[in-house]
Image (cartoon, rainbow, N blue to C red):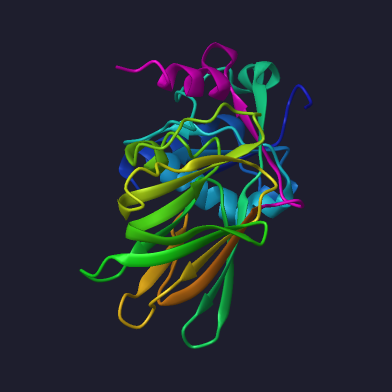
Amino acid sequence: MSDTPRIAFLASSTEPAQQALALMLARYGACPPEEADVLCPLGGDGFLLQTLHRHGALGKPVFGMKLGTVGFLMNQFRDDDLPARLAAAEPANLRPLEMLALTESGTTTGSLAYNDVSLLRQTRQAAHIGIDLNGQERVAELIGDGVLVATPAGSTAYNYSAHGPILPLGSHTIALTPLAPYRPRRWRGAILKADTEVRFRVLDPYKRPVSVTADSHETRDVVEVTIRESRERRVTMLFDPEHNLEDRILSEQFMF
């Protein structure tokens, strides 16, 4: 990255983020994402994920700054010395999950997920879901609220609250975690190689409807969902050296 990188600032709609955006534009100028050397979203983790979904295909590195309630994937906001921070930033390469869902109506929908893909029951009826890994049945019938697959970056979010494992960054693994499982009673999920193809089969979709959410993109009334790590898409996140993402994920494993 050059000494004077072209920075595209993007901000959530909250007042603090909009105020920070005005400050950064006045200091560093405006640049569209397509022409930038680096993207700089201002907000929380939710807005960062929106930025990745909207602009991830550009292949630009991303240096987020926290101006929201949650900012695990963000750096602290400061308006000074941003070019120097970018030059010293440490990269973390993330690959999203690719999700392909088939619905009751026969339509298919696809989406990317940088955090997780989760299947959830739509009604009071527990979901009944079969789980296949690389074409081989591993769980004939999971009964519960649902199930999710999380990336290492997303393993500290919904996955962790569901008692799933925290995955080290760069471990080339994904987490498979049941949500409030009733059967099998003792199954608590699995850590899988990142290139594993996970297929969920909704066993009783009419009586027990299920939705799938890839990050914030929801599809309802699904009958089958296939998930795999993307082979094509990769995003480079930039972090201040004193608080990089790998250290954050490691620290999360020692929170009491």
> Would you say residue 241 sits in the magenta stretch?
yes
Give left or right: position of 186 versus 59: left
Rendered image quadrant of residue 126: bottom left
Identify the residue shown where x is 51% and y is 16%.
Answer: 243
Q: Can I make out residue 201 in this image?
A: yes
Coordinates of residue 240 in the picture (x, y in percent): 57, 18
* Residue 233 place in picture, x, y as percent: 72, 50
Residue 184 lies left or right of residue 26; in this view the side is left
Q: Is any atom of residue 79 visible in this view?
A: no
When asked about the image quadrant of residue 101, the answer is bottom right
Q: Position of residue 47 (x, y in %)?
A: 45, 47
**Which residue is rendered at x = 50% and y = 52% of the image?**
50
Q: Residue at x 44, y 31 (%)?
A: 72
Quadrant where the image shows the N terminus: top right
Identify the magenta region. Answer: 229-256
Which residue is rendered at x = 36% and y = 35% of the image?
70
User: Which residue is the extreme one toward the left?
Assistant: 124
10 is higher (above) or lower (below) than 69: below
Which of 56/170 is in front?
A: 170
Instruction: Give coordinates of residue 116: x percent, y percent.
Output: 49, 49
Classify residue 138 by image quadrant: bottom right
Q: Nearer the viewer, residue 61 or 106?
A: 106
- Would you say residue 188 sits in the magenta stretch? no
